[in-house]
Image: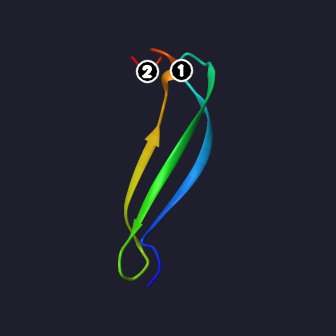
Amino acid sequence: MGARRATGYFVYDWGLKDGSAVRFECVDVFEFDDNGLIERMIIVYDTHPIGDKYA
């Protein structure tokens, strides 16, 4: 059996409540069970460039 983990790199274009557009990078980590189905997904992202717009 091969690796039970894979990653995907994404760039999200997102709209905030105030109407401004933001872009941020994200990596999703997928972990698979013995049948090759996704068992778990971990999302890693950094919204630091967005500032306090989520607060």
Colour scheme used in the picture?
A: rainbow
Task: Where is residue 10? Give x, y as percent.
Answer: 60, 46
Q: Residue 41, located in which quarter of the rendered image?
A: bottom left
Q: Nearer the viewer, residue 46 or 12?
A: 46
In-image side of 17 versus 5 (left or right): right
Q: Position of residue 33 (x, y in %)?
A: 35, 75
Residue that badge 1 annotates: 50
Residue 17 appears in the figure: no
Report the amino acid beneath label 2.
Tyr
Provide the residue designation for mark 2: 54
Q: Amino acid at mark 1?
A: Ile
Residue 16 percent across, percent down from the top left: 55, 23
Secondary structure under tag 1 reads helix
Instruction: Give the quarter of the figure containing the N terminus.
Output: bottom left
Label 1–label 2 contact, CB within 8 A: yes
Q: Residue at x 43, y 21 (%)?
A: 54
Mark 1–mark 2 Cα distance, whole angstroms, equals 8 Å
In the image, residue 12 lies at what x, y percent?
61, 38
Q: Residue at x 58, y 37 (%)?
A: 25
**Residue 55 visible in the displayed image:** yes
Depth order, front residue of 25/14: 25
Name the residue at 39% across, 83% down: 35
Other residues around mark 1 within 10 Å, as few (<14) / some (14–19) / many (≥20):
few
